[in-house]
Amino acid sequence: MMFGTDEIIQSVAPGYKFDALLRRRDKDRYDDREIVRTNLIDAFDLLMTFIEKHLNDPFYLEGTISVSLRTRIFRELVANIIAHREYTSAAPATLTIYEDRVELMNPNVPHYHGRIDPARFTPYPKNPTICKFLMQLGRYEELGSGINNVTKYLPLYAPGAGAPSFSDDDMFTTIVPRASGEVTAPLTAPVTAPVQKLLGLLETEGDLSNVGILELLSLKSRRRMRENYITPALNSGLIEYTIPDKPSSSKQRYRLTKKGKEVMDEKKRGMG
């Protein structure tokens, strides 16, 4: 589950799936979706990328150090649905972002049965081996820290939103309320000059790797390439991975989406 190929993972756990959904405008279906069936290390990264794509991250100082409240709250909640999921169940684990809340649900063998009081609970590991691996990889702090961090940081992240809830039943359910009027990452973003340049490159050259983009755009910094070109284009749905389940694959490339092609067509019409 941690390091296996997708084929091996599906053979030993055919029901294994994480389903990330954005339901901000379309409540019946979704505005955006990420289906994850890959190894647990890449699964964590894909789910966190989905969170980062659709939730804001307000500036916050803890003492003199800048702290990401979004990461503090959601990193271990994502780790929890991975580490404590019941992998023999055919039900998917889900992460759903609504206008007023974020819900995380995973198949579960209940230990407490019912709602958990953050002030009066003792952490209980469901998959201790997976927990240890995630801690060693830095994806997970310690058992029970997810509930503690949400309770501590949510009033700072979403003032006035109310308290989170945790329910230990056949589906372990975490509900993180969002503040009214909270700034949210837009469903569509303006196409910046660097993104337009990237779209034009992909239209001309076809699918490209990080190295190919770096060279063809004559850039020296990978970090700047990701911040100014790749990430905003991905977040706007203008480009996509050619291997979506493995974003860090050495064979990974980027290609234009239908939306990206439409943007380029519109640009050409405007120049005509």
Image (cartoon, rainbow, N blue to C red):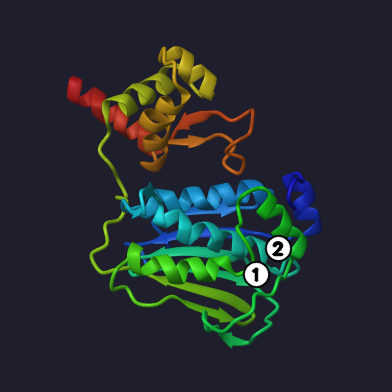
User: What number is the disc on residue 242?
Assistant: none
Q: Whole-percent x and y of residue 244? A: 57, 41
Q: Residue at left 64%, top 28%?
A: 250
x and y percent of residue 237 in the render? 39, 41
Q: On residue 91, which mark appears?
A: 1
Coordinates of residue 74 in the picture (x, y in percent): 48, 59
Sequence-first tag of 1 and 2: 2
Residue 215 percent coordinates (x, y)? 47, 13
Residue 70, image quadrant: bottom left
Q: Residue at x 32, y 25 (%)?
A: 194
Mark 1, residues whose alpha carbon is within 10 Å: few (<14), some, or many (≥20)? some
The C terminus - image quarter: top left
Q: Are marks 1 and 2 in contact (CB under 8 Å)?
A: yes
Label 1 vs label 2: CA separation? 7 Å
Q: Is residue 136 above or below residue 255?
A: below
Q: Residues within 10 Å of mark 2 (few under 14, many from 20)?
A: some
Of 2 and 265, the residue lying toward us: 2
Q: Secondary structure at mark 1?
A: loop
Out of 251 and 264, give the one closest to the viewer.
251
Which one is in front, 171 or 220?
Answer: 220
The residue to which callout 2 is attached is 15
Is any atom of residue 130 visible in this view?
yes
Question: Left or right of 122: which side holds 49?
Answer: left
Q: Which residue is outermost to the front?
A: 63
